[in-house]
Structures are given as structure tokens and as C-alpha cells.
Image (cartoon, coloured by chain):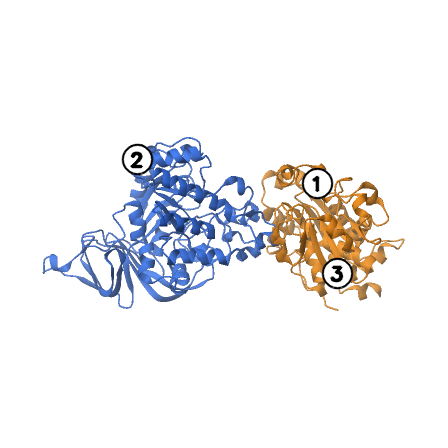
Amino acid sequence: MIQNTKPQDAHSPFCLQGGRIIDPANDRDAVGDLYVLEGKIVDPTKVPASTEWKKISVAGKIVTPGLIDIHVHLREPGQSAKETIASGTATAAAGGFTSIVAMPNTNPPVDGPNTIAWLLDRIEKTALVNVFVTGCISQKMQGELLAPIGSMKKAGIVAITDDGHCIQNNELMRRALEYASMLDLPLFDHCQDYSLTAGGVMNEGYWSTVLGLKGWPALAEEIIVGRNILLAEMTKAKVHCQHLSSIGSVRMIREAKGRGVSIYGEVTPHHLFLTDDSIQGYNTNFKMNPPVRTKRDQEALKQGIADGIIEILASDHAPHCPYEKEVEFDQAPFGVLGLETELAIYIKTLIDEQVIDWKRMIAMLTINPARLLKLDKGTLSDGVDADITVIDPGLEWVIRAEESLSLSRNTCFDQVSVKGRAVKTFVKGNLIWSI
Amino acid sequence: MTSWTRKDLVSLRELSAEEIRLILETGKAFKEVLSRPIKKVPSLRGKTVVNLFVEPSTRTRISFELAAKRLSADVVSMVSESSSIKKGETLKDTALNLQAMNVDYIILRHSAAGAAQFLSERLKASVINAGDGAHEHPTQGLLDLFTIAERKGDLKGLKVVICGDILFSRVARSNIWALTKSGAEVTLVGPKTLVPEDFRGLGVKIEYDFDKALPHADVVMLLRIQHERQRQVMFPSVGEYISLFGLTKKRFQKCKSDVLIMHPGPINRGVEVDSELADGLNSVILQQVTNGIAIRMAVLYLLGGGKGPQELVS
């Protein structure tokens, strides 16, 4: 029943009829029809009247710009047992995502124009959705010397990041930000002070105490968020703090944004849905970095979203092979899958709990990330690529690890009952996912 | 009395007070067996016990070995230095290989918290946790409880002070659960770096002044200062540790005359406890070791389908 459909003829004009069109960039939230011609969104009054539209009814469904996830690990090159560009983008399509941003912590890391050229070629040949690439901040991701950021920008990166690692040297971070601001590239930071997290595998608190697992305190994130705010203010560079997990991070970003500092943040589905008590059974599919924290942290993240302090949702889709995860908790790699399940989890935690409405949630998954990265994506404006997601908000389903299109199975939402799912995904007018 | 239904013994946190009592009562019966000239009973004849010690330990391994042998089981011990784990085999594969040899029990000592639970969920064999990281060491908690009860009778209302490296101690955690479930009042003492406030959530008191805690204590349990590499961050020097948290003769003056001094071993003489006090009349440190065998026999016997102490008496 669930399958990725073969690309259809993008040139046959079609019309998505009667759906609730939510296009936050154009302040649109109304029932209507959406027309696609030659892979672009069009105004039907401005094309020849003789055009014959294939009509596709999407009554009762929500029609949005193709969703964007700016934090995805596609694992190519070098770790293609976990995921490939082909499998990862198929997984994205199934989740309703038409544009994703690939993290550079591959093997070798994406730290120069040669790797980027290889990667872009591989994307061209195997990707099912749009993939934007990022480059490392530091050479070999070692946090010591600057990577050739300018050359990588010319080669096509949209941001720099050492994601999975965090630059500990504040001088290097300062110089990277000065350099990035010159090139107008945002920097994504995985905020983690290593001296505070040595050996840490879960949130430090009651449950780490009970389970005897080494704690990873919220402080380790907050101290780097604080540093990043100070450096963003000084350098005027755009710093995007990835996968925020704690009260203190939200509080500091709130304060800094109030002063106009160019600091941004994202929240993942697992930090919105899970708390550290989920690790009780030592299930390594609940081991991620940063770790899920407490109810109070979760509430602060939701408040940050409600108040517009946090403007982006992203999955940190991080596939790992079953055999890599089926080990002692201390030894398992950090990371969980996200692309296929995140929309449903956002609906459950943000819409159902009335944190924000649909329009704001879709903005967090479309125009907000597109603006941060200056992508020509995330809208349904006339003339743009017809990247479209059709969501059935009432579709009830149960997440099952074994049904994932990813090469990996490490979801932390296995067996969770959810409502709402992408039922059609179009990239440049091609239907690439349908159920 | 309640009956035993679990396949494994992974933690004391998950046991009920009744289950703990059943083990202690059964241990009492085995202690009687151990005082006989012939210390062997046929309860586990034909059963195979594997001691899988991925983290080194001498005392616990020998204690389990003796316990299993006195129950007439066949025992094999495997330590990490000589095992395939050293060659890169995963814990899961090692355990599955042992299971393929039809072993009945796996006694696991491992440096990772949760390792015993990991095996218990994947094996048909009974898994006994002989210490997993900083999580739990259930048979140590049980033998400590047994030793206290032997001397003090009812545990309800008893004041137990546990002093030392609590943060990294599986012994502390198992004792906290066993003692609080049995109605004892537990106070943790030690440097704040090793006794974080988060422990209050486990239903215990915390006191950073050892001298204040001592006068009320019925039992003082001292834990080994370990993790040598972390020592410099967690406290400045052994000398300073002794001055604040060592059970010195001077501090001992503040204690009740019938206070029990306990230590799970191995002791750093003159560090956690004064050397003479460790050998003195209030010390039950070696009784703990003796009782360890009886308790481990009780656990092996109950996991193997044993009914309880009544069966042993008859």
C-alpha cells in the first residue's frame, strides 16, 4: 500500500482541488485550488485558456508548500549501510519533505569543494527530493583549522556546521563567524561543551541517578548557546543553534532576540514528545545527542515556539544500523530517525496541544527555514517550483519501525499512535509519494 | 509468604518488599546449610552457571562460584581478558553463544549500566546482575540487608548512613532501594561532587557533615573511593577526604556504642575507615562476605524455581 511512485510526466498540467491551502509566506489559509504547469505553480488566469487541467481532488486535506527539514544526516559518503541519499530522500518524501539540508559529518567529512562536487553529483543522480548541502566549519571537522568556507560557498553550500561536533575553541569560533558573515553564510552549531559531557549518555537528573548512567547536563548546551549569542552579537553573523533541549537555552535566546541579535534555534520532534524517563528500559533508540530532558524543559521549548522565539522545526534524522544500536547503552551511537514521523509528532505536540496553529507550524517547516538559508523554496507563490505537500490531518496511523523506508530502524516513536500524515508529495510537479 | 516468579535478578528497584524478604528468609536457611560439616545441597544438580565477568572482580566472582558449587551446579567462569569480548565480539553475541551451549544461568558483571537488563531481555537463561556500571549490584544490597537484619532484627526505622562515592556506586543504589523498601531511613554522606542533590528523589536524606550524621546512625556503611582518574576533579586529595569523610577513631567516638560498621570491599585501610575500626568489634565487614554466599545461593535457588525457605527446612 505504501510506496514511492515513479515520477510522472511533470508537464501534464494538474490542479489540486478543494484543499485547505496553507501558504504562510503569502499569508494564505483558505480552501481553494492550486494549479501546476510544467513543474511550476501557476495562476490559471495567466496561462492559455485552452490548458487542460487534470483534476485531483484533495478536499478535506491540507495543501502546503513542500516541507523543509534543515537537519538531516544522509550518511553518504562513507556510511551507506546506515542511509544513502537515495534511501534518505525516499524517506523524506514519505514524510512530506521536498527539501532537506544534509549535514557534513560524513566519512570523509564534507570539508572542501571536491567532496561537495562529488556529493552534488551523487544528489543529482540519486536524490528523490531537493538536497541542499552544508560544509564543515573546520578542516576534517577537527575543530582546529578553518575549512575553505569561501571555496565551499562557490561550490554550493548553504550553511557551515560541524554538526555532531562542537567547536570548543572560542577563538576559532569567533574567526569562523567573522568569515561566515563576510560570505553571508549562516553557521549551524551543535551546542555542546565537551568538558561537561565526558562519558555522558543521557540527561543529568533523577533518571540518570536511578539508572546509573552518566549525566549530560543541560548546562553543557546552555554554556555554548550563551557563547554563541555573544559571538553572534559581536560578529553580526547568523548563528543557528541546532536541536535545542533546555529551559536555559530558550531563556537566553529569548533575551538575545529581544535585543536584535541574529541568533536562531530549532527544536526536534523527540525533544517535544519524549522526556528522560523514556530511557528506563535502557532502549538505545532513545539515546540521542542532546538527550531528551524533563517535562519542564519540554514546556519551555513549547513556550519558546508559541512565543516565536524558536522559529524552525527539524528532525536531526540520524540513521544507525540495528546492529550498531543493539549494544550496551553506553556503547550505542547517539541519534534517531525522524523524517517520516516528524510531521505527525509536531501535529501531536504542537497542534493537538494548542501550542500553535497550523499556519504557524507550516511556517516553521517551510518559509522560516527557507529564509534563514535564503532558499527559493517554502512558498506556493506563482512561478516557483511546484514543491507541494498534501497532508491528511485526520489520517490515523501507528508508527512502525519495520515499515520505515530508511535503511535503518532506530526510531524512538515505534508503536506510537498518531494522527496526520503526508498523503502526496510533489517535487517540481512530480508526484514522488502517495498513499 | 510470596513466591518467586522472576526469571532474572537485574535490580532491587523493581522488587517488592515481600520479594526482598523472601530472598532474605531463604538466605537464612542457606546460612544454616553453610554451617553444616557438609556444605553442599543438590538443588541445582545438572544446571550450568556461567560467570561472565566483563569487568574484573575477584570477591563477587568467587562468592557466586562457591554459591553455585554448594548448590551442586556446574560452574564456568569467564573473564574479559581471556574472552572473545576482548576480540571484539559484542555482548549480545557472546551471550547468545553461551545460550547455544544451553547454560541455565548467566551471572554478569559489566561496566555498562543496563547490561544485565539488555541480556535478560534477549536470553532464555536466567540473568543475575553482579554489578552493571553505576546502576545496581543487587546481591550486594541483599547481603548487606541480610547482615544488618542479622544483627539488628527489624529494619523498620533503622537509621543507616551511607558515606562515600555515591554517584558512581551501584552498591549505594541497590542498598538505597533495599533499605527504603524495608522501612529503614537512609542518609547519604560525602562530598557534594559525589553525592548530588538528585539522590533526594530516591527517598533518602543527604548530609554533607559526617559528624552531624554519625550520632544517630545505627549502621554506617562506607563505600570505596574509586575512579582514581576522576579523583582530582571530585575532591582535592585523599588527605582532605579523610579529614571530612573518613571514619576515624575520633569520629567513631560520636557513634552509638552498638553501631555497625560495614564496607562492601575492597577497603582502602585508613581512607574510608580507620584500620583498627575495620577489624574491631563494631565491624561486620567479613560477615558481609560470609553472608554473600548464602544470599547468592538463595538467589540462584529461587531463580531456578525453588519454592522458598520452608522447602529447605524439610
Distance between mark 3 and mark 2 Cα atoms: 70 Å
Asked whether, in this view, residue B247 is left or right of residue B12, the answer is right
The foreground one among A117 and B135 is B135
Dot 3 or dot 1: first in sequence order is 3
The foreground one among A213 and B90 is A213
Q: Residue furthest top?
A: A145
For the residues labelled 1 and 2, say whether their Cβ atoms are less than 8 Å apart: no
Of circles 3 and 2, the one toward us is 2
- Name the amino acid type tagged 2: Met
Residue on which the image places disc 2:
A182
Residue B193 higher or lower than A49, as above or below: above
In the picture, the quarter occupied by the C terminus of chain A is: bottom left
Helix, strand or loop status at disc 2: helix
Q: Residue furthest right?
A: B37
Q: Position of residue B129 (x, y in %)?
A: 67, 52
- Chain coloured orange: B
Colour displayed for chain A in the image of the structure: blue
Residue on which the image places disc 3:
B23
* Chain of the residue under the numbered disc 2 shown in the image: A
- Name the amino acid type tagged 3: Ile
Q: Position of residue B59 (x, y in %)?
A: 75, 45
Of circles 1 and 2, the one toward us is 1
Q: Residues within 10 Å of mark 3 (few under 14, many from 20)?
A: many
Residue on which the image places disc 1:
B241
Residue at figure coordinates x 22%, y 51% from the top left: A385
Of circles 3 and 1, the one toward us is 1
